[in-house]
Structures are given as C-alpha cells and as structure tokens.
Amino acid sequence: MKPHRARILAMQATFQKEFHGRSEDELMKFDWIDFTPDEAELNFARRIISGTFEHQQEIDAAIVNHSKNWDFDRISPVSKSILRISLFQLYYMHSELDFKIVIDEALRLAREYAEDDAGRFINGVLDSCYKDRYTVKKN
C-alpha cells in the first residue's frame, strides 16, 4: 500500500464533493480515478473520506479559526480539500499517524496539486490547529 496514493484519492474525493456536488456514495465507487489502487489504498482512502465528511463542520470551523486574515470562501477548493483530509487525520487518526507525516503529506499534495503559494498557507493552518489541539497551555 502507498498511503500517498490513498491521500490523493481522499483529496480528490473531497474536491469532487465541493466543486461538483457528488455524493459520498458516488465518490466511494471511485469511477473517477485515473490509476488502479490496491485494496489497502482504497480502504485507507475510504476511511479518510468518510471521516472527513462526517466531521466536516468541525474541520471547517478549525480552518476558519486558524486561517488568519483569510476569508474561507477565498481558499481554493484544492487547498480546502487538502486541509480537510489532513485535519481529519490530525484530529481523528492521531494515535495511528505521526503529525509530522500528516503535515509532510499535506505539503506534498499542495506541491503536486495546489497553487504555488498554497504550501505555506496549508502548513501554517495545520501547524496552528495541531498546536491548539495538542499543546498543553501554560498558566
């Protein structure tokens, strides 16, 4: 299994939902992909997709709260998709996945699919969300 390929599928699925309005059931058929993933990749992608959709309100609220000086509607659909799947992994798969891997994978997706300056923005939002959720506050 190549987890990066599963993350590509998850990112593309969240993009498809946002940009084309496809349902989760339609997306889980993976009839829109241009490569043949193995079963483990499909299962990992399905888990990320389902979880991202299930927790999208909380995830979007975190993006809004941590994207300083950015209007949520101005964030590109590709960047939103990368942020959504990455935050799902950071928030709900944190016991299985190292946060550094999740952030590195998000930056790799940004380099491959997003606009040139998206990586810095995505890194900043994910880092801020991670620190806010997992760093112990000192009084």
Image: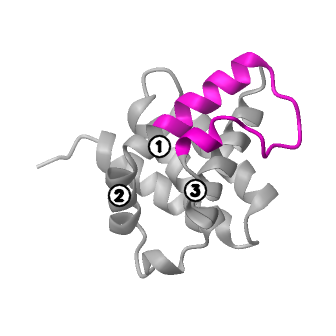
Query: How many numbered marks does the figure carry?
Result: 3
**Residue at label 3?**
17
Measure how far apart labels 1 and 3 are at the Cα level.
Answer: 11 Å
Type of amino acid at the residue the image marks with label 3:
Lys
Q: Which one is in front in this view, the residue at disc 2 or the one at disc 1?
A: 1
Q: Which one is in front in this view, the residue at disc 2 or the one at disc 3?
A: 3
**Mark sitting on residue 138:** none
Q: Is residue 52 in view? A: yes
Measure how far apart labels 2 and 3 are at the Cα level.
Answer: 19 Å
Q: Which residues are magenta?
A: 24-50
Q: Residue at 70% across / 17% down in the picture?
A: 40
State the image coordinates of residue 54 (x, y, percent, origin top left).
39, 41
Residue 47 sits inside the magenta stretch = yes
N-terminal of the pair, mark 1 or mark 3, is 3
* SS class, disc 1: helix
Measure how far apart labels 2 and 1 are at the Cα level.
Answer: 13 Å
N-terminal of the pair, mark 2 or mark 1, is 1
Type of amino acid at the residue the image marks with label 2:
Ala
Relative height, residue 79 to residue 130 (above, below): below
**Residue at label 1?**
52
Q: Label 2 neighbourhood size at 10 Å, few (<14), some (14-19), many (20+)?
A: many
Q: Which one is in front in this view, the residue at disc 1 or the one at disc 3?
A: 3
* SS class, disc 3: helix
